[in-house]
Image (cartoon, rainbow, N blue to C red):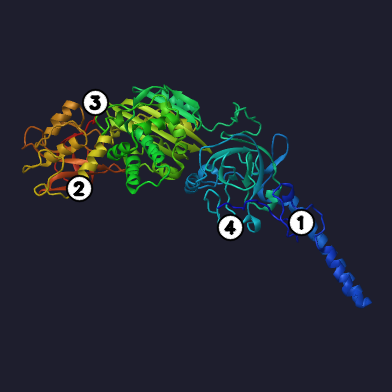
Amino acid sequence: MSWRGPERWVALTVGSRSPVSSSRTSRRAPRRGSPPVGGETDHRRSTKRASSGEAGYAALGVLAVLLVVVVAAVLALAVVVAIFAPGAADGCDVLDGAGEPVGPTVGSLGEVAGSGVTATELETVRSSRLAGGTLSSGSFGSTAYGPPWGGIQGPGRSTAGGLVIAGGAPQKYLIATDPRVISLGQWVYVWPNPFGWRGAFLAADTGGAIKGRRIDFYDWRGRAFQNRWNRQVDVSDQPLSPDAPLSDDGAPEPGGVVDVDAAAGQAVARQLTGQPVGFALVDDRGRVLGAVAPNATNRSASITKAMILIALTQRARDRALTADERELAVAMIRRSDNRAANALFARVGAASVKEVARRAGMTHFGLVRGKQTADGYVLGGSRVSAVDQARLFGRIDQLAAARHRAFAMRQLESIEGAGRFGILDAGLDATIRSKGGWRPENDGGWTVNQAAQVTIGGRTYGFAVVLGKQQTLRAGASRIASVARAAFTGGQSGAVSEGCGEADIPLSGETGERIGQIARRYLGKDARRQTFKGFRPSTTRLAWCAWFSTNVWREAGVPIDVSWFSGYHYTWAQKNQTLFKGVGSRPQGQTPPLGSALMYGSGPQNSTTSVHLNLVDTVNADGSFMVTGGNQDSSRVTRQGPCRLVRSDPARLRGPGCDGRPIYAIAAPTSPT
């Protein structure tokens, strides 16, 4: 529901009952000093009543004189208030380039980009039926509207974009537009404007008289401020300095306001080590602001899941998402669940994901054939470049179908667990929608990628870093955070962070995530009475902790044979160089990698020296972790924790219910591909 009716107008002439046109001239207040309408009529009635006698006539004359004096005083006071009150209450007027008053300076209103609009309200507007990706720049006519509500303007309950007003006067930088010219949900810069505000306005409303290249500023300060505004303005998706002309295509000419330091981001990115190393920062039109090896391609890992999410919204653009689709999308994005991604990829298909790449302007993206999905693709092995991912995320909200945009963006803003790294740890005062990808590689090191849409200072950017051959996940994540801080805080981050010394260990990987999910699935099950579907062989022996753990690893995609010997993981990890702790050495860090196998005893020689094995199924934000194992409580799969690792040789666990026996080794899983 819009704030106003089909034709917004306000009857300003006292005593008038006829509709007033919505043109700007008809909305102006009466001229200062004009006599009040109805005064002459009152005087005639008074004269008629005085004809009964001279004394009464004289008394009435005195009253009339007093009345004239009072009315004159009131009018004089009104003139003074009209001239001086706005400036006194709200600060000095700002002048535009021609020396004309713009309006009283207001400044930042807090919330998203200083607009006064909350993140929830922004989602509401962007999910409305009038939201979209249309944004026309250039010269527009502009007027202003707002409270007091009532009459032909209506009660002011909510905007056409669904932003609730409830008849009040909330302070927010909003404009009403013609959605065919500027879609609702778009951030636009307008100069001059009634507030002297250099930040962005949210297109959140419509109006019957707002057609074509015309906008209406929402002004909560009342009718006096609204009536004084009627002028041509420049509109752009880029910040406009007061004297910066618009180019032919509506973009600001060089030399305008810049609120990021792409050069600083580039400088930090050039210090990064690994192969490949790519960085790109683009605006929401896909124009590159800064880059280092932007076209270098890397394995995508989980970063491709964002494309599957957008493909899902497009496939379901004319219907509601099913409960199953929503559940899978939440798991795929928030927790980076591979099974959920495979299930959704099977539904949307490779062609839909490729179409997302085409619409985003991605030129290096490629799906890779393999055995991970039912139709023969290895999603984590897809090829991506920094510039492609930056362009995707720079417009990812616009690429999502309007019907499901709010839901999709909410998932990208709600990353959980091991995926909260890099730019999410950079300390930015911004709205960030992101997806990371991380995986240990067979050829050594880690792939660590991250892409994000960053809205900061009223502008939106696409940011991406792709890193190969990183020593650990944490090292790569820390380096991405360093680039983000430099790019979005003017280079204040200093040198590249190389991680956290001995604590710089791989917190997780996609394989580890799967291992934890699978292990938890069997909690409480009795191996003597239940068949573990997919495990081989289907029957167990007396000591079956290793049988359980090797089957879990295999189901998660780790190329390991099934074994009943708890020391087998040690031999396998030595061969594949994934030991987090070996015999005779301390653990590499305070937290073992997610999915790791903890081996209890004194060594891997035989069943007497290697006595038990557990799996790390969850890693908590504070570095503690949960462990799951078979054959711990009689014949059931049970769980312990939260536990902490004592970094000694042998190592030990401490924590509620945690197995305190000596740990001679810890083996991390490897890549499923």
- The residue wearing badge 2 is 640
- The residue wearing badge 3 is 442
**In 3D space, how far apart are the residues under numbered discs 3 and 4 (Cα atoms)?**
62 Å
Question: Which is nearer the N-term, disc 1 or disc 4?
Answer: 1
**In 3D space, how far apart are the residues under numbered discs 1 and 3 (Cα atoms)?**
80 Å
Q: Is residue 219 visible?
A: yes
**In 3D space, how far apart are the residues under numbered discs 2 and 4 (Cα atoms)?**
55 Å
Instruction: Please name the amino acid that badge 1 sits on.
Output: Ala
Instruction: Please name the amino acid that badge 4 sits on.
Output: Gly
SS class, disc 4: loop
Instruction: Please name the amino acid that badge 2 sits on.
Output: Gln
- The residue wearing badge 4 is 167
In front: label 2 or label 1? 1
Graded by Cα atoms within 10 Å as few (under 14), some (14 to 19) or many (20 or more), the crowding at tag 4 reads: some
Question: Which is nearer the N-term, disc 3 or disc 2?
Answer: 3
Residue 37 in percent (x, y) is at 80, 60
- Side of 306 where 2 appears, left or right: right
Task: Choose top left, top right, bottom left or bottom right for residue 16.
Answer: bottom right
Question: Which is nearer the N-term, disc 2 or disc 4?
Answer: 4
Residue 657 in percent (x, y) is at 18, 49
**In 3D space, how far apart are the residues under numbered discs 2 and 1 (Cα atoms)?**
76 Å
In front: label 3 or label 2? 3
- The residue wearing badge 1 is 78
Residue lying at 72% horizontally and 35% vertically, measured from the top left: 98
SS class, disc 1: helix
SS class, disc 3: loop
**In 3D space, how far apart are the residues under numbered discs 3 and 2 (Cα atoms)?**
31 Å
Graded by Cα atoms within 10 Å as few (under 14), some (14 to 19) or many (20 or more), the crowding at tag 3 reads: few
